[in-house]
Amino acid sequence: MGIHSITYCERLFFLEEVEGILLADQRVYEGRKLHEEIQVENSDIHRIETFEYTSEKLGLTGKVDRLQKRDGEWIPYEHKKGRSKTDGKVKTAWEPDLLQVVAYAMLIEEESGREIKEARVKYHYDNALVKIPITEELKKRVQDKIIRAKTLYEQIERPPVSSNYNLCLKCSLAPVCLPEENRIIDDKDYPAIRLFPPSRDKKVIHVMGYNSFIKKQGDTIVLEKEVEHQKVKETLPMNEIESVVIHGGAQISSQLINYLAYHNIPIHWFTGGGNYVGGLNFNTNNVKRKLRQYDAFKEKKFCLYLTQKVAIAKCESQIRYMLRSSRGKNKRTIQQEESIRKVRELIPEISKAESQDSIRGYEGIIAKYYFQYIPSILIDSVPKEMFPEGRSKRPPKDRFNAALSFLYHLLFRSVQQAIIAVGLEGSLSFFHSPRTGAEPLVLDLMELFRVPLCDIPLIGSINRLSWDIKEDFLVTKEKVWLSEQGRKKAIKIYESRLNDKWKHPVTNYSMTYYSLIELEVRLLEKEWSDKKGLFAKARLR
């Protein structure tokens, strides 16, 4: 029933009921557990029942926790895990709980044809039972909320963030709403409280090898693989899995595909060479989010503004890494100094650019200097075969570019999954054109993460001499790509980097790179659905 959420916060109602975004935090799970325990505890008491009612006249559907008959009168009960509201020395119901149980009374009246004179709310934290006389004034307040809800259903734009920050602290949808981030935009000195999760609590499962097979068995995933003519099995609980990635000739059972699809768990497929093929992703009831996105991206000036932000963020990360990687050395070479000088001169030009084509031109020149710089930061003991010869792709011509391209494909999957989780449309972009099978919005947002999530970890692993030039690569005259062993190594490097923590310079709280990707997608959406200002502010230190 949306009466509770619309009374608590109109923005929460809009996110849950209009956009269909539902997230469960610890409080939600504890509340569900309480209701389950109550049902079991009272399953043998026939005078207490649980009913679900629907009224087309009122436009309401609700499930009553308890309906108990006392002195010949039916009384609806609502159970809450938290504490009651204290008004002086009197314990009362909170407004959302009050109107929710009154709405139940109205539903029961219509269903039974009998007047409901009283409703009750039981607060289990302080063991308070609040009795509520059903009055016409309370019914009118419920009807006003119903009218307001119908108005919100018709609009495209989200209601503003609540001015009462205490409501946000206990809201399960705070990671979607990002109320504290809105307050940072209004007041740069605002001491924001972290409401966005710092890390992920589930795993990405990568399945590799033509003799690998993954299937469903009960509530677990079973991975079978033949190693030296013997079958090896590995079992993982379903509730620990965020997504499944199938590489090359690895196989997945149709029963598992069905299960993952039913539970909205994404599945991705990569070629044996590491190219992203496609995936099953799930995101429903997000039409209004996509309409807002479409309207925003129709504006050329707005698209240019976003393109400048992304390009500057990427290029500033590149030059900061160039400077950082040569810090502490006796002296930079003339070529290094020249590359740094050129990049420094070009970055300010991006903010002056009057077209996206101009920005592409500046980006291309900066990338050329950046990739020319990379060999100079590889240590002397690195095999010459691991040195890049500029940037080559489709196909990569050397081992460095083969590994880098594979990492970029892994990044593509991560960004795409975040876009889907947020509910944006990957085919609607502000910068890249939809010329290939790759969704252009994914390519737009990848620019923010190429340096910290792919370039830096790869260069670090090369300097640690982690790569075997023979066993990790397959080399031909036309191209170079990673072997199965090389892909496993790259996945380990990438997944490890995703779990590294990093402090956002604007929000001023730490999170893993995995969480940062989703945060940036949500901050992008804020650029047109709420307030501008925080998107693409993150920089490599």
Image (cartoon, helix red, strand yellow):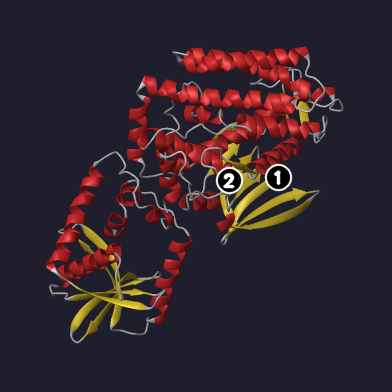
Position above or below: 397 against 446:
above
User: Which residue is painted at 22% across and 85% down in the image?
Assistant: 70
Position above or below: 48 against 539:
below
Residue neighbourhood size for the residue with mark 1, other residues' Cα within 10 Å, grouped as few (<14), some (14–19), many (≥20): few
Indicate the position of residue 179 as horizontal and vertical percent values: 41, 46
Indicate the position of residue 56 as horizontal and vertical percent values: 17, 58
User: Which residue is painted at 28% across and 39% down in the image?
Assistant: 156
Horizontally, is 446 left or right of 148 in the view?
right
The N terminus: image quadrant: bottom left
Q: In this view of the protein, which residue sits in the foreground, 443 or 163?
A: 163
C-alpha separation, residue under disc 2 versus residue under disc 1 = 37 Å
Horizontally, is 500 left or right of 126 in the view?
right
Residue type at the position of mark 1:
Asn
> Mark 2 — residue?
511
| Whether residue 271 can be seen here | no
User: Which residue is painted at 70% across and 12% down in the image?
Assistant: 338
User: Which residue is painted at 47% across and 35% down in the image?
Assistant: 534
Position above or below: 481 against 167:
above
- Please report whichever mark, 2 or 1, sits nearer to the chain's N-terminal start: 1
Numbered tag placed on residue 243 in the rendering: none
Q: In this view of the protein, which residue sits in the foreground, 135 or 430?
A: 135
Horizontally, is 394 left or right of 481 in the view?
left
Confirm or deny contact between disc 2 and disc 1 (CB under 8 A).
no
> Mark 1 — residue?
211
Indicate the position of residue 293 as horizontal and vertical percent values: 37, 32
Which of the 4 quarters of the picture holds residue 136? bottom left
Seen from this angle, which residue lies furthest right?
A: 381
Residue type at the position of mark 2:
Met
Residue neighbourhood size for the residue with mark 2, other residues' Cα within 10 Å, grouped as few (<14), some (14–19), many (≥20): many
